[in-house]
Image: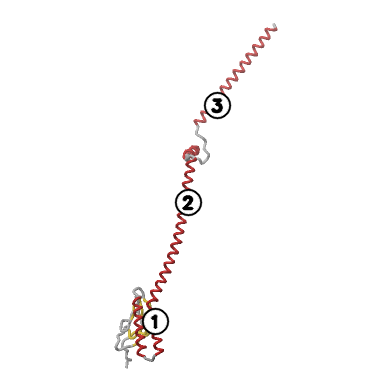
Amino acid sequence: MANEKQNGKDAETMKQKDGEEMASAEKEQSAKAAGKDEKLNAKAQPPRRTPGEKAGERKNEQAEPAKTAESAPNFPEAEYEAKIKELETKLKEADDKYLRAVAEMDNTRKRTAKEMETLRLNVMMDTITPFLQVFDHFSMAVTASSASNNLKSLLDGMKMIQNEFDKAFSELGVVKIDAVGKDFDPNLHEAVSQEASDTVPAGKVIRQWSFGYKTPQRLLKPAMVVVSSGPQQKADE
């Protein structure tokens, strides 16, 4: 009898264990099924957006790292080194061209200054040389006048000096302005005064105090003249 009771208790215990195992298995299956449903629902639903976020922005943000990775050049290290050497060579060439340009500019400035100085000296020599003979003749006339009282020879010497002056002016392209009897021209003449004249029409030059001088390009010195104002008007009687 005791054995039968013990066997009955063991059978009940086994049934109870089997029931608990079956309940546990059912719970696990239910939990797995619930997990699958949640995953399916999460895939089906779109991602939540923050306030003000537009549709598609989150997708773009997720796609940007991939695009950046794709757009980044995948140069090997050897190509990078070659590119660096190429840029260094170009930089060296540009620096060399810059130094050459600076040196050439400095040489041009010095050469221009030297040419200007040479030109100035040449102009001075061309201007002075024609008057050297004039100065020699003038010195000879002064010496002759101090040793002789012959006025005629002195006058001839002065005329010779004047001819030498005229020749020197001609070589330099200088033209003498003789205004006597000509119409007054403010571009060439400077009126010292006006005088009435019964023989010289108004606006004509009566006398000339000094000659004027000009070149084909510009006026060097105006002629100093006296201009006629026409016949003198008689006072009413």
Which residue type carries mark 1? Asp
Answer with left or right where residue 118 lies relative to residue 177.
right
What residue is pinned by disc 3? 35
Quadrant containing the C terminus in the rendered view? bottom left
What residue is pinned by disc 1? 136
Relative to 181, does residue 18 appear above or below in the rendering?
Answer: above
Front tag of 1 and 2 = 1
- Describe the element under mark 2 as helix, strand or loop: helix
What residue is pinned by disc 2? 92
Label 2 environment density (alpha carbons within 10 Å; few <14, some 14–19, many ≥20): few
Q: Position of residue 195 (x, y in %)?
A: 34, 87
Q: 40 or 90, which is in the foreground?
A: 90
Q: Position of residue 178 (x, y in %)?
A: 33, 82
Label 3 environment density (alpha carbons within 10 Å; few <14, some 14–19, many ≥20): few
Q: Position of residue 112 (x, y in %)?
A: 42, 65
Front tag of 2 and 3 = 2
Q: CA distance from mark 1 to mark 2?
A: 65 Å
The residue at the far front in this view is 147
Q: Earlier in the sequence, mark 1 or mark 3?
A: 3
In the rendering, which numbered label is found on residue 64? none
- Describe the element under mark 3 as helix, strand or loop: helix
Q: Earlier in the sequence, mark 2 or mark 3?
A: 3
Q: 11 or 176, which is in the foreground?
A: 176
Label 1 environment density (alpha carbons within 10 Å; few <14, some 14–19, many ≥20): few
Which residue type carries mark 2? Lys
Q: Is residue 55 visible?
A: no
